[in-house]
Image (cartoon, rainbow, N blue to C red):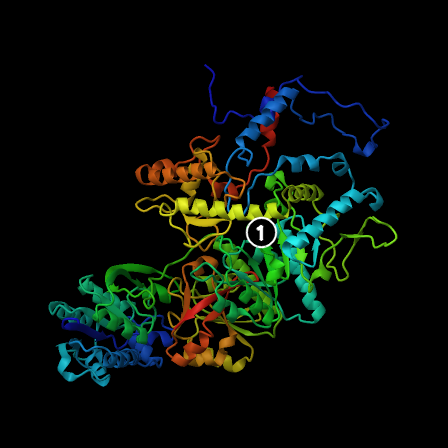
Amino acid sequence: MCDKKCVGFLINPIAGMGGRVGLKGTDGMENQARALGARPAAHLRAMDALCRFVQLMSHATAFPLRWLTCSGEMGEAVLKTAGIPMNVIEIVHIVTGQSTAEDTRRAVSSFMAQKVDLIVFCGGDGTARDICSVAGNGVPILGIPSGVKMFSGVFAINPVRCAETMLAFLQDRLTAVQTEVLDLDEASYRAGEWKVKLYHAALTPFEPRYMQSSKALIEDVDDTAVRAGIADYLLEQFQHETPALVFLGAGSTVKSVGDRWGIDKTLLGVDAVVNGECIGSDLNEQQILELLGRFKARKLILSPIGAQGFVLGRGNSQLSPAVIREIGCNNIIVIATPAKLAKTPVLRFDTGDAMLDRELADDGYIRVVTGYRRRTLVKTML
Amino acid sequence: MPEIDNRNSEKTVYELSAVGRGTNLMPECDVPKTELPGVLLRKDTETIGLPGLSELDVVRHFVHLSQRNFSIDGGFYPLGSCTMKYNPKISETCARFEGFAQSHPLQPDETVQGNLKLMYDLQEWLKEIGGFAAVSLQPTAGAQGELTALLMMRAFFRNCGETGRTQILIPDSAHGTNPASTTMAGFESLEIPSDKHGNLDLAALNAACDDTVAGLMLTNPNTLGLFERDIETIVRCVHDCGGLVYGDGANMNALAGVVRPGDLGIDVMHYNLHKTFGTPHGGGGPGSGPLGAGDKLAAYLPGPMVRRIDNAEKPDPGYMLFTPEKTIGRMNSYFGSFGVFVRAYAYILQHGAEGLKQNALHAVLNANYLREKLRGIYPLSHDRTCMHEFVLQGKIDGSSVRAVDISKRLLDYGFHPPTIYFPLIVPEALMIEPTETESKQTLDAFADAMKAIALEAVDHSETLHSAPHTTPVGRLDEVRAARQLKLREDDRKVKDNLNKA
């Protein structure tokens, strides 16, 4: 069996807070997010992963494992609550006051000094960048997804899969491969501009079924006609139905639908349309719920993130489980160009509500609108 | 010293034109001369701009152009999913028989009984080959056959009051015409993925089958050259949800005389006479896509069709046109591509039932022989016994060449390239269909060329990137050609040439 293994573990406690209140990221916006009613959720995602890990360990052949972490909410608290024995946890960095990116970097320095086998973190692209700025590609890193957007290839698709990947790697069943750490320029992102930059090459455990591939930005000029076809088809469908409240999700595919309809659609926000008029732009969870209270007929148009395949749970956390339940799973229309689907073999849902995710994934396949009167049956995976 | 350019030496007829030269060997007028109506007379005196050429100039010009073309008569043409088999010359001779070639579609039935008998026999033979209740010869192409079948399905469901059936299921390996025909017929298409063996994914099919499904369009063997092993389960699944199954008969060359699609439960299917039955394709066309239908749909076939006159008192009462009871109407002004019917009729007569079966078996044998010869040199899309065609990937370890480079280089070796980048589900696809009419020597020579190209790909990749080198024109900018169409000679250039002449 394996030699003694050592995991460096840290949580970015504020990761993901900005998303639920429509801030498209939390970097430098923590206070504003709190003022808008956002609550920290990263520790819950970390807890899901660790509980699953403890459960898996109890069935696996035992092997010695040591955990290095930070004090308090940056790691220690969750590890203990999840049932990791106290005698295998070592605090290598003490956090004083509110944690910052500097705390992440210091903790990683200590992890590296003690030659950890794997760094597991809970956060988003910003956290991954901070870790890689110190670790480089000297040690594999694995993310429990908890940020607003997660373009980097170091994230598992959800906390449960993260636990499984973690165990397989520590048992030497998986090897590590190079992947990219990407991040958005959040200031540009808030202004409606989509700037994804490659920041680092990192190592990550290789488990193709469970790891997100780095988002492939799929742009094809020939797709213009296809996008127009999708928009015309949707419009034609809505003309036969009761005037409905139509929400248009984020991304360039959905934006091109808005453009074709003559609506000034935001690239990254959720906008609302009634009778061809835009009645709300860049809405947050609360604003969406308010609109839903006023209109009975409703539709939500979404497009997956290229390659990764996330339809919900990446970049659109204002579409919370409460919002999705209110809209109704049957009223969600997923659209994608064939070029995007060619690189996106499965679609995924990670709303934070496992039961809802299962409902959204339907019976293993969903119908994606890929052109004028054209749909494609695409596999879903949880 | 005159400039010599053998590669691009063929000039246009306007450039070849010379003042005063011409050909005026007109046949003697066999109708009374009369004045043209005044409104049709040219008002201005401007020249109509015809080039001045002798008969020999014209003959040489067009012979040169024809020699630049690649044809089945000139070389091996393994264009996947197109069944580029040899078109027998006797079929051409038959199509030129005066009785066929000079007949007019508006002649009274009693004066064209021979034509009607030929159409009737062809309908009956195709019924027998496909295992269907009835056949209509109306559609003039495979894609028109698809559209016709979908219009019949639409009429069938309207007649049953099932107007909620709007979806047509189409595998992701299907011909691109399938979704296009679906949209034209007013349906919506739902693409179904293939499984790892290259067959239709049964779990996905099951998930898609519900009461919105009007039917499934299935090509068997599929465009990967693989037989749908679960064909009976697939047909049952669609029928159980109330849908109909359409067979895309483009790949019938692998089945003719061996398996009858109607026996497998296919409700309606088009045949490509210009593939399976050896009639010319494309520029040498036109095509023909007759449609066979089972009991459920036979009454909806387009007319006119031909039947024997029912008269017990006469030994041979003759043939007449009729239109099926619930027909969707006509798909063409007259009877379809009659000249193609004659060629296909002659082809079926030449081979007979046993001959057609042997053709299918040899087509499959040839494809498998070539597949085995190329195994290990190029990756196979699916490593299992194929039917009439197979798909390789145009990728070589340690080389940057792509399927397009390999194809262009094949032209230098004297072979027409395979179909490339199709089916879409195979990256860098090279889809090879040798057909039954090619000899072992030809297949060996093609395999040798493919092997030589694989070696060049590693040692001299630039030779491939810039291929072809021996053809009248080199590597074309195909994207620009498709986007900036130039379909006619520039008027000013034509006039300049005429003035110079």
**SS for dot 1:** helix
| Residue beneath the point at 71% across and 26% down | B46
Q: Which residue is drawn at 59% across and 35% down?
A: B488
- How many marks do you count on the picture? 1
Left or right: B28 in relation to B14: right
Residue at (30% x, 64% y) in the render: A153
| Amino acid type of the residue tagged 1 in the rendering | Met
| Residue situated furthest top in the rendering | B1
The one of A51 and A225 positioned closer to us in this rendering? A51
| Residue A20: image location, x then y, percent | 37, 76
**Dot 1 corresponds to which residue?**
B252
Quadrant of residue A208 within the rendered picture = bottom left
Q: Specify whether residue B432 is in view.
A: no
Foreground: A6 or A234? Answer: A6
B99 on left or right of A154 = right
List x then y, in percent, for residue A358: 42, 77
Q: Quadrant of the C terminus of chain B?
A: top right
Q: Is residue A147 visible?
A: yes
A359 vs B47, nearest the viewer: A359
Image quadrant where residue B282 sits? top right
Q: Quadrant of residue A134?
A: bottom left
Would residue A317 appear left or right of B324 to someone viewing this image?
Answer: left
